[in-house]
Amino acid sequence: MSLPGAALALVRALPDSPAVLLARAIVLLYLALRPDYRREIRRNLRIIMGKDSRWFWMRNGWRLGRNLALMARIGERTGDAFIDSATVCGENLTRQLLEQELHVAMASFHFGLWEYLPQVYSRDGCRVVLAVGEQRDPGLGRQLSALRRTGGVSMAKGIRQAIKAADGPSITGFMLDNTSQGTQTWTECDGVKVRLPDIGFRLAARKGGGLAPAFARLDRGRLRVDAYPAGDEQAAARALLDQVRKHPEEWVWWGKAGAISG
């Protein structure tokens, strides 16, 4: 088993509080050993937030460690309690899907508790399919796939399966903010240029709609989902920047492969 796979298995095996502490320690140690990622976090913070902070990476790693530990609880009692407590704010995608028989392409942008989004909508009666790329680490990929398939969520490998799965009322989920795979598109919002993979937008256009940004985070002990109206690349970038500026610690600021510029 690889080191990331072993870490995930250990976090899932521990009780909640020790699991959070371990995940935080792992993320902070990882960032401490990656000066390139620390520089990227600082650079992106200046571009998006308009301020400089040498130590923001520690706040970011502390929060992300907690979030990763909580997402590892999907399929367990703790994870089920989060899903049961979820409050969905903004665009009522569930009502649209069930009443109007629509297909919605949705993106989570590696923000907050993003892995809970498919579970929330699946529990609410939607047919949910995730379009994800293959992990470089096969063992970790198998563990993540098992987590993501919880609650009746399906997985699509490749755009052809995603297109086929998009027939009828359903949600196809993407992440869309830190991959250099496939064709890319640049969009500008509030003086910030963001490069996004266009696969989700192409699927949404094929089905006659836009891509819906959605974000999940822990808010006063409950899972909060903020969903935005479906739109084009600029609307997606605007929604992402809105959430990141309001809750900067919730986002993964590194590994964007040069996809942000001012």
Image (spheres, rainbow, N blue to C red):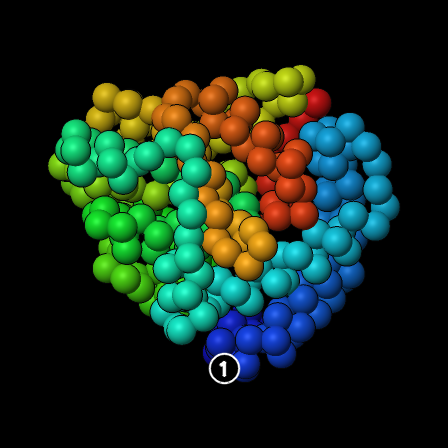
Picture residue at 16% right of the left edge, 33% below the top: 99
Residue 11 vs 99, above or below: the answer is: below
Residue 188, percent from left and from top: 58, 18
Residue 75 vs 220, above or below: the answer is: below
Q: SS of the residue at dot 1?
A: helix
Residue 129 vs 48, above or below: the answer is: below
Residue 258, percent from left and from top: 63, 35
Residue 178, percent from left and from top: 54, 42
Picture residue at 49% right of the left edge, 82% below the top: 13
- Tell me if I can see residue 166 in this picture: no
Between 34 and 115, the one nearer to me in the picture: 115
Between 165 and 153, the one nearer to me in the picture: 153
Label 1 amino acid? Ala
Q: Pointer 1: what residue?
A: 13
Residue 94 vs 151, above or below: the answer is: above
Quarter placement of the C terminus: top right
